[in-house]
Image (cartoon, helix red, strand yellow):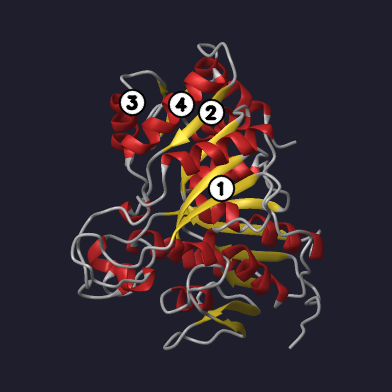
Amino acid sequence: MEYGIIPGVKKIAVLRALVLGDLIFVLPALEALHHAYPQAEIVYVARAWTADFVLGRIPGISQVIGIRPAPADYEDLGFLIHPEDAAWLFPQMEAEHPDIAISMQGGGKNSNPLVRRLGARVSIGSLESGATPLDRCIPYDYYQNDVIRNLDLVGLAGAQPRGWVPRLPLLDTDREAAAPFLAQIDRPYVVIHSGARDIRRMWPPEKFAVVANAIKRKLGMEIILTGSAVDAKAAFQVENAMKKNAVNLSHQLSLPALTGVLANAELIISNDTGVLHLGLAVGTKAVGLYWGEYISKSMPLSRDSFYPLIAWERRCPLCGLFLDRKEVVRADPRPCMHQVSFISSITPKQVLDAAERMLTYQ
């Protein structure tokens, strides 16, 4: 069914309280929404860290409401946000009277009831089995590209795609935040991001080190290692395997500083993480290392600046159990608890060849 523009829209609430990559995947949908409703305020309900980064950078977003995730014991009961935040969020949103509320978060089992409570005239979201229906829904299946899914959702409000490639403007504040870190770099550099939230999609640090050393030796470029507090260990493992022959900025960069560092890089080599997608969004070339189970959701749709390397392993290297991503994340109890890489079959030569191809590609 095709939907047109909803009349009289002055305020739109968008729920997307997830991590960095998820922010990047929503950018084309936000652009389409702003173009369809240029006079409307867009209220972005997201993780608290989003506020300073998003405001003034993404057109149309006039307000970011930062919410905390629910504690683990509440998540088990189906709660998405911290109960203390829920106590003030819903009265505030009801008082603001949004005309449209859109959930861009999952299949709707936990998020759709929250969107209904925002008090909008029209509620929109995905619908998986057992989820609460909203006014307008699309069927949810895990194996769909997230950029396209979000565009499908805003399409239910009559918003048409303006493009399918996420783009994020680079601000002067990003350059200023990155400048102290880049002052120590006197030649072109490649960023290597070796962490990820799921160890199954992490390439082994010793293999990253082989590639990094080859880039320094063959191409004469510097290597910058990045990583958050969560995955800084992987960056240090790469550094140690390289014999400390890199600039390790893991756990040192603010998000604006990271954005500036990525934007000035010649190339990013990364597991499938938010850092990879942030770098692509600011226009930097990248080589991405993927577990086949993730490519339908998160692989970029354009190849003009991106080269993917995919590992198709679906059996645990330790126990041989056949797994897909839904079983890994959602099954209770999980069928396999081994913490092991599923992408180690990708070779350093493949990554180095891809890196050289992207560095010479105009």
Q: Which mark is residue 277?
A: 1
Q: In whole angstroms, how far apart are the C-alphas of marks 3 and 4?
A: 14 Å
Tag count: 4
Dot placed on the residue nearer the N-terminal end, 2 or 1 = 2
Does the residue at mark 3 contact the one at mark 1 (Cβ under 8 Å)?
no
Dot 4 falls on a residue whose secondary structure is: helix
- Image quadrant in which the C terminus is located: top right
Closer to the camera in the image, 327 or 27: 327
The residue at 35%/67% (across/down) is: 314
Q: In whole angstroms, how far apart are the C-alphas of marks 2 and 3?
A: 14 Å
Disc nearest the viewer among 3 and 4: 4
Dot 1 falls on a residue whose secondary structure is: helix
- Kindly identify which residue carries mark 2: 190
Q: Amino acid type of disc 4?
A: Ala
Crowding at label 1, few (<14), some or many (≥20) Cα neighbours within 10 Å? many
Crowding at label 4, few (<14), some or many (≥20) Cα neighbours within 10 Å? some
Closer to the camera in the image, 311 or 301: 311
Dot placed on the residue nearer the N-terminal end, 4 or 2 = 2
**Residue 335 in view here:** yes
Disc nearest the viewer among 3 and 1: 3
Q: Amino acid type of disc 3?
A: Glu
Left or right of residue 162, residue 111 in this image: left
Q: In whole angstroms, how far apart are the C-alphas of marks 3 and 1?
A: 23 Å
Give the image location of residue 35, x and y in percent.
Answer: 80, 60
